[in-house]
Amino acid sequence: MPQSICHSCGSSSFRLSRFRRVDLGRLLELQYPVRCRICQARQFLFVLTAFAFRRKGKNKGKRGNGAMPENHAA
Ligand SMILES: [Zn+2]
């Protein structure tokens, strides 16, 4: 399996990036935009890998850090 590591800082912590129209071509290649939580670099991961970051951290109850509004693109 391909490891998902930031090409910029080597972190493996990502969140989903906002999907743009220009990303459609990438989506056809099953790539989805994500953003590194450490250095904020934007890059693409395999869609299933990317979506795995969507809920990461919700199972283990750390301290709630307030509201995390999800993007509801119109
Ligand atoms: Zn990074």
Image (spheres, rainbow, N blue to C red):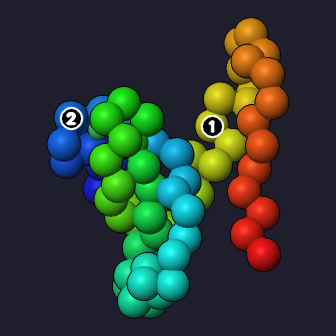
Q: Residue at x 44, y 64 (%)?
A: 33
In this orientation, which residue lies closer to the viewer: 39 or 48?
A: 39
Asked if 39 appears above or below 30 in the picture, the reply is: above
Q: In this view, does 57 lie to the left or right of 20?
A: right
- SS for tag 1? loop
Q: Position of residue 26 (x, y in %)?
A: 38, 82
Is residue 1 in view?
no
Ligand 1 quadrant in view: top left
Figure check: 62 above or below 46: above
Q: Which of 54 and 73 is in front in this view?
A: 73
Q: Residues within 10 Å of mark 1 (few under 14, many from 20)?
A: few
Q: Name the residue under label 1.
A: 56
Direction from residue 8 to residue 44 in the image, left or right? right
Please name the amino acid that badge 1 sits on: Lys
Closer mark to the observer between disc 2 and disc 1: 2
Tell me what residue is drawn at x 51 percent, y 84 percent: 21
Q: In this view, does 27 lie above or below 33?
A: below
Residue 10 x %, y %: 22, 35
Q: Where is residue 5 in the image (x, y as percent from the top left)?
A: 28, 44
User: Mark 2 vs mark 1: which is more N-terminal?
Assistant: 2
Q: Is residue 20 visible?
A: yes
Q: Where is residue 1 in the image (x, y as percent from the top left)?
A: 33, 56
16 lies left or right of 65: left
Q: In which quarter of the image is the C terminus?
A: bottom right
Does any atom of ligand 1 lie closer than 8 Å to the CB of label 2?
yes
Mark 2 in CB contact with mark 1 (< 8 angstroms)? no
Badge 2 element: loop
The residue sitting at 52% across, 46% down in the picture is 15
Quarter-of-image position of residue 38: top left
Which residue position holds label 2?
A: 9
Q: Is the CB–ligand 1 distance for label 1 below 8 Å?
A: no
Q: What residue type is labelled 2?
A: Cys
